[in-house]
Amino acid sequence: MIVEIVSTGTELLLGQIVNTNAAYLARKLNSLGFHVLYQSTVGDNRERMTQVLATALARADIVITSGGLGPTQGDITKEVSAGLLNKPLILHGPSLERIRCFFQQRNLPMPDNNVRQAMVPEGAIVVENERGTAPGVILEEGEKTIIHLPGPPHELEPMFERSIVPYLTRRFGEQGIIVSRVLRTYGIGESALEVKIRDFILNQSNPTIALLARNGEIHVRLTAKGASAMEANELITRLEMQLRQYIDQYIFGKDEESLEIVVGRLLQEKGMTLALAESCTGGLVSSRITDVPGSSIYLTGSIVCYSNQIKIDSVGVPAEILERYGAVSKETAYYMAQGIRGKFRTDLGVGITGIAGPGGATATKPVGLVYIAVDGPAGCDCQEYRFFGERTGIKHRTALAALNQLRLYVGR
Amino acid sequence: MIVEIVSTGTELLLGQIVNTNAAYLARKLNSLGFHVLYQSTVGDNRERMTQVLATALARADIVITSGGLGPTQGDITKEVSAGLLNKPLILHGPSLERIRCFFQQRNLPMPDNNVRQAMVPEGAIVVENERGTAPGVILEEGEKTIIHLPGPPHELEPMFERSIVPYLTRRFGEQGIIVSRVLRTYGIGESALEVKIRDFILNQSNPTIALLARNGEIHVRLTAKGASAMEANELITRLEMQLRQYIDQYIFGKDEESLEIVVGRLLQEKGMTLALAESCTGGLVSSRITDVPGSSIYLTGSIVCYSNQIKIDSVGVPAEILERYGAVSKETAYYMAQGIRGKFRTDLGVGITGIAGPGGATATKPVGLVYIAVDGPAGCDCQEYRFFGERTGIKHRTALAALNQLRLYVGR
C-alpha cells in the first residue's frame, strides 16, 4: 500500500514551523508496514491544494493530509477534497454537538465560524477529536482513500493512534509486521557511539540500525520485519543483546522511557524520597521529575535558590562557603545537596549550581561550568561539567546530567 | 519567482528525521521575496525522484533540492537531474582537489567512492562546500534553475547563505522586501479572535494576516511586501494600530517576546522582586522565568512544595487551612503566595496549586482545577482555572496562566 502524506498550511511554506507531523505519520505508517513514498506540502490555496491532492491520489493508494480543518477562512482542506470528488459538504450533527459541548465545558460562547468544523463531505467517515474541535475525516473513493487529520500534533497524534490505525488495519489488513525498539543512551556522542557498533551498522539488514541524536541523547533504533510480532521482537532482542556488549553502560532506557521516568521507577523500587536545590536550572529538573504521573510519591519538594541569601537562609549553605568558594563551586553544590536533604528530611538531596550565561562568567569560571551533587545514604557524589551553547541549551543539558547522575546513584 | 523545495532521502520518508532543511530554506527564501509554493519529499529512488523533479520543474521557476550528494550508492540526486536534462556527468577537477585536501587535513585515506562527489552535470556551476566534501551544484536550463544542496544542515546553511543567496540576487535581482511581525496574544481562542478582526482578514492583501495557534497562545502574523524595509514596516504598523482597536487587551508581546520576557521587563521597570511557591507546576514557572538572561535580578527564588508538609514548614501555609479547604483551594493558593512573599522577603509572591492529573481528582475537584494567587503591594489577586488535557499539557497551560496573571498584576 503506497501512502502520500500531504501537509497543508502556509506557515509551513513560510518556514515558520518545522513539519513534525509528516515525520510522525511517516514513522507510524512505516511501522505498520505501509510504504510512504511521497510527502508534499502546499499552502491554503484552493487551486494549488486541488492540484497537489489530485497528483497524490494518482500515485498513492492512501493520501493522508494534516492541517486546514480549523474554523477560520484559511482552513479549506475539506472543501478542496469535496470539490475534487464532486461531493457536497453536509452538516454532521454529532460533531456540531461535540463542538458545542467543547465550548460549554469551558464556559465560552461558541463562535458561529466553528460550525464550519462540523461540515464534512457527503459519505465521509467522521473521526472524533478527543483534544479539539476539528473532527477528522475519512473518504473512500473506490480503491483510493483520503484521510484528513487536524494540524496540531496534540490532536493529530491521539486521533491517528486511536482511530486511524484501527481503521487502516481493518480496511487493508496486516501489511506484514514491522517492530521498532529504541535504545536510549546518554553520555556518549553520535560518532563515538557509531564507532563502537560500526560492524553491526555496516552489516545491517534485518533488523536495521539507525542512530538518531535527540535533545542531548543518542537513540539507537532497531527495526525488524517479521511474519509475526513475536518473530520481529526476537530478532530485535537478539541484536540488542549483541549491541549491549559494546554500549550497555550508556543505555538508560527504551522507547518512551525518559530519564525522569527511569529515575522515578528506581526511586519507587528503593522506596526513596527526593528533594532538590536548584540554582542555574531554575526549577527545570524538578519540573521534569514532576512531568511523571505519581511523582508526588517520591518528590517531596525543591528550592530554587537563585539568590545567595536563599542558599544560606532556606537551604543552609554556610555563608563562609559561598564566600570562600563562590556560589558556583563543588563545595556549594555539596552543601546545597546536603542542606536540602536535611531540610526536607528526604533520603536523597540534589544540589545544582552553575553559570547558564550569557552573563556571570569570570576568568576562572566560564559560562557552562556546572557542579551537580547527589547526597544520600551512600555519601555525596559531586561532579563537575562544562557545557556549551546558549542559556536554555545549557539548562537543558544540565537537567539531563542531573537526572543521569541521580539515576546512577540510585541504581547502584 | 516561484520556488519548489525538494527534499531527498529515505530517512525522511521513514520519519527517522524531521525535515528542518525545508523550513530553513523556506524561511530564507521568503525573506528574500521568493514565493515558496511547494515542498516535496522523495526517497533515494531514480524513477520516483525523476518524476518528482520533473513535476517541480513544470510548476516552479527555481527548484532547490537537499540531500543525495554524498559518496554512497544511495546518493543519486545529481545523476537524476543530469538524466532529466540529458547532460553527462563530468569530473570537476577543483572539487576532487578539495575533497583530497579534506581527507589529508584529517590524516585520513580518501575512499575511492568520494570521487563520485566531484562528478557534476556538464555546464553546471559548482559551489564550494566549506564544511564537507559534497560540492553544491547550480544548473541553468533556459528560464528554469535547479540548485542541489547537501543534506547536513551544517553544510547546507552556510552554503546557502554565502553562495546561493548572492547567486539568486545576481540572477533574479531584488524580489522586493518582505517583512513579518507577529502579535502574540493570550486569553482568547483562535476562532473568537478571528471573529473580532474578521473584516481585516477577509479584506487582506498587503499586509497579509495569518492566525496561528502556538502552545496555548494565538499569534497574529502580519506580513507586508514593500520596495524598502521601511515601507513594509510602515504598512505593518498601520495595520497593527487598526487591529489593536479590537484585540489590544489580548496582545502581550511581539515576535520573540514570550510571556516570561515581558514579565521580566515589567519587573525590572518597576524594580520589583519575585518569589514563587509552585505545587502542581513543579517548578515549571520558575524555570521559564529563569530562561530569560538576567532573571536573577528579579527572581529571588522559589519553593516547589509538592508535599503538604513542605507547604506548612517551608512556605508557611497554616495546617488548618490545608485541613479545612484542602491543598487545591483558593485559600491555600492565597497563603502560598503570601507565605513565600514573606519568607523570601520579595515584593511579589505567587502561589500555584492544582490537580495536574491523571490521579488526584475528587468528586468536587476535577483534574485541571487550578488556583493561582499573586500577592503584592496591591493586595492578593487569586484566580480559579479549569484546564483540560493530559498532565504536561495542564502544567504548560497553568504556567502560561500564571505568567499572564503576573503580567497583568505588575503591569497595572
Image (spheres, coloured by chain):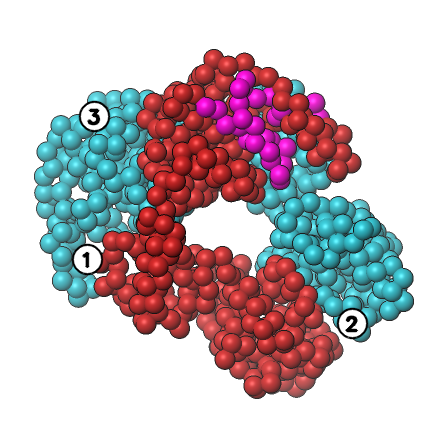
Chain colours: A red, B cyan
Q: Distance between the residues labelled 3 and 1?
A: 31 Å
Q: Residue at x 73, y 51 (%)?
A: B367
Q: Say if A98 sits above or below B373 in the image.
A: above
Q: Do the residues under discs 2 and 1 have CB atoms within 8 angstroms?
A: no
Same subunit, tags 3 and 1: yes
Badge 2 crowding class, 10 Å Cα cut-off, few under 14, some 14 to 19, many 20 or more, is some
Q: Mark 1 points at which residue?
A: B102
Residue linked to disc 3: B141
Question: Pointer 2 indicates a residue of which chain?
Answer: B
Q: Is mark 3 on a helix, strand or loop?
A: strand
State the residue in front, A305 or B51.
B51
Segment colored magenta: A111-140
Image-quadrant location for residue B214: top right
Q: Is mark 1 on a helix, strand or loop?
A: helix
Residue type at numbered disc 1: Phe
**Dot 2: what SS?**
helix
Q: On residue B309, which mark appears?
A: 2
Q: Is residue A286 above or below residue A114?
A: below
